[in-house]
Image: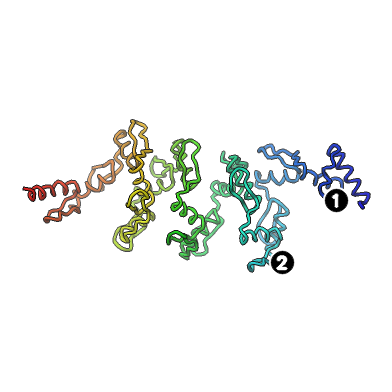
């Protein structure tokens, strides 16, 4: 039998909902009418508090106040045992428990313990594989509702977190916080083994593997191992051919989101990476780094098998495969194999006939971006490769190498039938015809 107070609350809720006793679907009761009205909003979904800085609506004024602190970066709740501050009182209370070291809730699968039952439930899903939160627009599922909410934004394109110092917006609050360090220059994450510091904790963890050499994540299809799981996931796509990132301006797809971002710049023409020593700008940071070595001439990466040194670590890795003979990238249409995935991609175009690189000054197309760049110099007259021993400049690096043999006297192309050697392969081919014509005569 219900007490008088419970009946009065229910009667008021019925009046509040216009005569529909919707509240009878639950058995909760409250000591104050105001509390029962707040609870009822959970069932109706009503959101009467609007944020004037974004399109978010919230059900309570206190939620609006907490939400708006994301813009102001206000964190009024200070931990009395360390220097951390928080925007919510509940987050502070949870944090303070980390100082007590008392985790009363024990996992039955492993030795981990947790402060809250909700944390244990989330942790247990890592053992069971349960993903109860299903996306309504694709087949992906998630262990937590918050991860589902973040994923939904990949469908809607919603970016509710706006930087207050520039126009950039993000789908996740953590991405905004990460971005803001670019403005502040803050690098909170210090390596304990060297003097390097990082803006992101993930970057620090990745860097620390350069000290330990630890590679815990092993590919199940080949022998490669990786220091971070995200690198393994990306690597797997080289086996599966999966390209989940689709360009919204053309039909191209990519295996990594970073490749898609870089590709977008071919449509926009954006070149955000500016050289500080000349007026050149680049669409990729890696291209800028490569370019900067033309100013410094620095070659930090030395091959342990020979005397060659390289300005880029990736170039050293590719070179080292010439010593091992390893060619891990196999063409699925012929028996050719390649040292790098990029060379395999270029080779595949000989089968498909694809020429995706278009010259903007004429109607020529090319299968390789490098060939397009070299071709465009026939229009501009640019000759970026300068000989260090004379005033000769070349439009192609290969032409500069050939030219420099005039100064060094190097003749790497040796005839197999006599003792003559040549500075160019074409000269060797012409010479060898003399031997073949003699043998035929």
Q: Can residue 66 be seen in this view?
A: yes
Q: Is mark 2 on a helix, strand or loop?
A: loop
Identify the residue at horizontal 27%, vertical 44% (top origin).
386
Q: Between tags 1 and 2, which lies in front?
A: 1
Query: In the figure, residue 123 lies in which quadrant?
Result: bottom right
Residue 259 position (above or below residue 128): above
Residue 311 visible in image: no
Residue beneath label 2, please? 104
Q: State the residue in front, 279 or 325.
A: 325
Residue holding disc 1: 29
Q: Which colour scheme is used?
A: rainbow
Query: Looking at the image, which residue sits at the far bottom?
Result: 111
Residue closest to the far top: 362
| Residue in the foreground of this view, choosing between 302 and 237 | 237
Estimate the x, y position of residue 206 in percent, counting from the top left.
50, 58
Spatial distance from mark 1 to mark 2, Cα to Cα? 29 Å
Which residue is at 36% across, 53% downward?
A: 330
- On residue 74, the disc is none
Local crowd at mark 2 within 10 Å, few (<14), some, or many (≥20)?
Answer: few
Extreme residue in the front direction: 333
Residue beneath the point at 92% across and 49% down:
5
User: Can you give x and y, in whole percent of width and height, for residue 69 in the image?
Assistant: 68, 46
Which structural element holds mark 1?
loop
Residue 337 relative to residue 130: left or right: left
Q: Residues within 10 Å of mark 1 (few under 14, many from 20)?
A: some
* Disc 1 + disc 2, Cβ < 8 Å: no
């Amino acid at each position: 039998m219900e007490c008088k107070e419970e009946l009065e609350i229910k009667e008021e809720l019925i009046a509040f909902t216009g005569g529909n006793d919707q509240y009878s679907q639950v058995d909760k009761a409250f000591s104050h009418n105001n509390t029962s009205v707040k609870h009822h909003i959970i069932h109706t979904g009503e959101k009467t508090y609007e944020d004037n800085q974004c399109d978010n609506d919230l059900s309570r004024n206190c939620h609006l106040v907490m939400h708006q602190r994301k813009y102001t970066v206000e964190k009024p709740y200070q931990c009395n045992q360390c220097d951390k501050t928080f925007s919510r009182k509940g987050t502070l209370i949870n944090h303070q428990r980390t100082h007590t070291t008392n985790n009363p809730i024990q996992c039955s699968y492993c030795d981990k313990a947790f402060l809250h039952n909700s944390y244990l439930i989330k942790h247990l899903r890592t053992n069971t594989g349960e993903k109860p939160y299903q996306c309504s627009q694709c087949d992906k599922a998630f262990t937590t509702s918050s991860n589902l909410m973040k994923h939904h934004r990949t469908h809607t394109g919603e970016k509710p977190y706006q930087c207050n110092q520039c126009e950039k917006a993000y789908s996740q609050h953590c991405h905004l916080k990460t971005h803001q360090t670019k403005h502040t220059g803050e690098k909170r994450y210090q390596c304990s083994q060297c003097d390097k510091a990082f803006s992101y904790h993930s970057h620090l963890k990745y860097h620390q593997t350069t000290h330990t050499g630890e590679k815990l994540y092993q590919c199940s299809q080949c022998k490669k191992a990786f220091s971070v799981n995200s690198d393994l996931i990306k690597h797997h796509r080289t086996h599966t051919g999966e390209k989940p990132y689709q360009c919204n301006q053309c039909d191209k797809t990519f295996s990594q989101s970073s490749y898609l971002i870089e590709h977008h710049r071919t449509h926009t023409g954006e070149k955000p990476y500016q050289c500080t020593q000349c007026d050149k700008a680049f669409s990729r940071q890696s291209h800028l780094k490569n370019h900067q070595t033309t100013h410094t001439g620095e070659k930090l990466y030395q091959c342990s098998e020979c005397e060659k040194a390289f300005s880029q670590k990736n170039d050293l890795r590719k070179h080292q495969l010439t010593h091992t003979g390893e060619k891990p990238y196999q063409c699925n249409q012929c028996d050719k194999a390649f040292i790098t995935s990029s060379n395999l991609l270029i080779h595949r175009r000989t089968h498909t006939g694809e020429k995706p690189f278009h010259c903007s000054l004429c109607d020529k197309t090319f299968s390789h971006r490098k060939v397009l760049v070299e071709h465009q110099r026939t229009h501009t007259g640019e000759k970026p490769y300068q000989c260090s021993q004379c005033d000769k400049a070349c439009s192609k690096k290969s032409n500069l190498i050939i030219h420099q043999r005039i100064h060094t006297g190097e003749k790497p192309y040796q005839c197999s039938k006599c003792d003559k050697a040549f500075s160019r392969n074409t000269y060797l081919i012409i010479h060898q015809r003399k031997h073949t014509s003699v043998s035929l005569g």
